[in-house]
Amino acid sequence: MNRIVRAIAAAVLRAPWTVIGIVIVLTLVLGYFNSQQQQVTGNEGFSPDNAELTALERSNELFGGTDTVMQVVVESSTGDVFTAEGYEAATTLRGAIRDSDAGDRLAAQPGRDNVITWFAPAEQVAGAQGIDLSSFDDQQLKEFYRQAYQSVPEEQRGFIDPLVAEGADVARAEGGKALVLLFLDTADIESDDFEAVTELQTSVVEAVNAAELPEDISADAFAFGLLFDQQDVATEIARLFAIAALIILVVLTFVYAVRPRGDGSWLAAVRRTAADVAITLGAIVIAITWTNGIGVLLGPDYLDVIGYFNPITQIIPILLIGLGVDYAIHLNSRYREEVSAGDAVGEGVRTSLTTVGVALVLATITTFVGFMTNLTNPLPALRDFGILASVGIVAAFLVLMTFVLAIRLLLDRRADRGDRLPRRSLDSTQNKALPTLMSRTAVLAERTPYVTLGVTVLLAALGGYGLTQLKTEFSFTDFIAEDEPILETFETLQDDFGGGFGETTSVVLDGDVATPEAHNAMVDALENLSDVDNVRTAGGSALATMPPTILGQLLAPPPDGRPPQGAGEDATQAPGDGEGAQAPGGASAPGTPAAPPELLQAVQAAGLGRDLRVSDDADVAALYEALLDAAPDEAGAVLARTDDGFAGQAQVQTSAGEQGAGALAGALAEAFAPVTDAGLEATPTSDAIISDVVVQEIQDAQVQSLVITVLAAMILLIIVFWVRMRRPFLGVLTVLPVGLVLLWTFGLMAALGIAFSP
């Protein structure tokens, strides 16, 4: 460490202009790379490398949905949306959405309109009978809706009920909140082109906000992609950075303030104070530029060591402000002390570097090691944070130790030659209220050491107990400002609509699904799904889409007059003879099958029965080929050709939300046990499930990571004190307060109800 400090001191003293020039050149180069910085939001970077994430990526790669679902939450201040005003709002919203910039992207399918309102049953019947619902008053509209709802088959009401908030009586046309669903065709948009999709969604939001609704009705559009608007995150980080910079400016002005003592004017004192503040802040900006530039070089576009910047790594500049100020105050204070005592400017710089600098080297190394222990963290975002924070710490150390003192050396040498160096005034900064206050706290250790130690241990014990009571929570909405209106809409969907009508959980099937065993196992899993909590059902059958259910839909189409369905809604049917084929769960589909001849031939060859099962020697690959040819969009969402045969997945309509995602994943895995027994892997996945996995990873790693960090720092300090002073126990004593502070922090978190999260 001494060699490092002596080398820095020699460079600063012998060639300050060269040091400044090197720093400026490096800043320009790294500033260029900093301009290429890319930021990600949402769950990207927070998902650990595990089966759920791999399955989700595989699902997006192979199946990638063609429609993007948006929801509009409609609420009446009167507590009833089944009114004439409610219907006016529904039709107004439908028109506004269709007239929006996203109108050309609205996607309709047979049996499903592109915009669906909670009045769907009444609108379907009224349309068939040529009735104008807008002429009805409240009571007439309610009565007509009740009759229309009663005409809806039981197995299809599962598509209607979720359009109204939980707890409402849909059959009686009573409820204060409802949904409007719309479907955007995004098939030709690249899967990673989030901006294009967000632009469409934003146009819908603007159209909904501009719609002229009845006074008692409000409407808010929602899409998950809108939760993670990068500009919102960047704006919030910028706000925090500005606040931190302002606070630091005040602190530095207070600490660096010079009071004239006969060797300078007040104007000179103000200039000296302002110069020291400006140099320190400039050095911090340089350190941040270095950190971000190196972060880009380490990122996916260059060395691919870390990911793109995320909401966690964007906090590092705020961390560097505090760290840089700490370094600067230590160095500048010691330098002023030496110069005010009569030392030459160069000697003051040397003494400051060789005394305080040694301590700063040790602090930098231990902090570097502490952050690098994040490499053991299972969350990629936190691993990246550890690496980038370590880089920032080293950058701050180098800039503050070289650039700041080099500039101060040049300025003060010039002032000294002109006899303008305020040596006596610099000494005034040593007698401030803060040092006096800090010195008085030593009385506790001097006069009541045992009491002080006892209180410390007691607080540590309370903190340890608080650690056992800490809850671990994580939601991707944690990175969204609390006052964002869309967050309130999201919470309404979670609380009142069971996560929203658009909640879909995928079960990705790894292996060739085009075998009789796999096909029949999927049918068994479909039957099991109807008993799983938080899986939506219709007529006792689970609302799930998988290859067998697509076959059922094509071979037993829904009858005319059926109310529109929502995203992924499948009244699972089996082929029949036109007299009401039965599917798993008992749903009936009267009518004559309408399927392409090629598909019917493949069905017959496979021995597909009314229960959707095939014969043991069926050529399922040929059946699935015919299925994909007959319905490429519908079947393509759950079935894909691969080099190894056919890949498949199940899309299950669920209502677990984030809180119930973990239990749902376990229940789905159990329901798909027949598929696993058939030799395939079945992995339930969704953003909510991955969020739950993040929570579990945090719970498993939180204490372990802290222990590793403290132990690594302690071992390093033990080695340093052993080599330098032959007193290794000083390393333990140095780290002990850190452990105590951690325990106190945990205790305060538990007392204040602050959960443990990334």
Image (cartoon, rainbow, N blue to C red):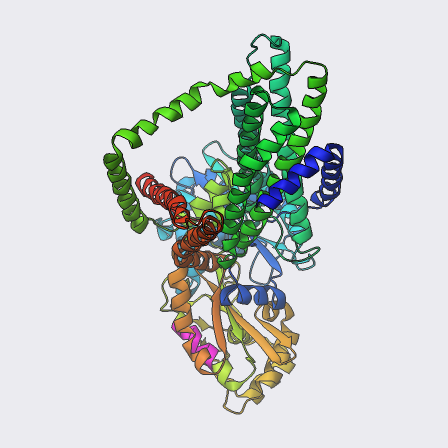
The image shows residue 72, relative to residue 547, as above or below, that is above
| Count of marks, rendered view | 0
Q: Say whether residue 665 is left or right of residue 35.
A: left
Tell me what residue is drawn at x 37 percent, y 67 percent.
532
Q: Give percent across and percent down for residue 754.
A: 37, 42
Task: Identify whether 425 is placed above or below 86.
Answer: above
From the viewer's perspective, is residue 297 above or below residue 151? above
688 or 221: nearer the viewer: 688
Residue 90's spot in the image, x, y percent?
Answer: 52, 43
Please tell me whether the stretch drawn in magenta is mainly helix, strand or loop: helix
Position of 144 relative to 534 (above/below):
above
Residue at 54% x, 50% y is: 386
Residue 269 sits in quarter:
top right
- Residue 527 painted magenta: yes
Tell me residue 480's x, y (percent): 51, 42
Specify start and end residues of the magenta stretch as a single range.
Answer: 521-528
User: Which residue is situated farthest in the bottom direction here?
Assistant: 617
Could you say which is closer to the camera, residue 19 or residue 205? 19
Q: Position of residue 459 (x, y in %)?
A: 28, 40
Q: Determine which quarter of the picture holds residue 262.
A: top right
Front residue of 545/404: it is: 404
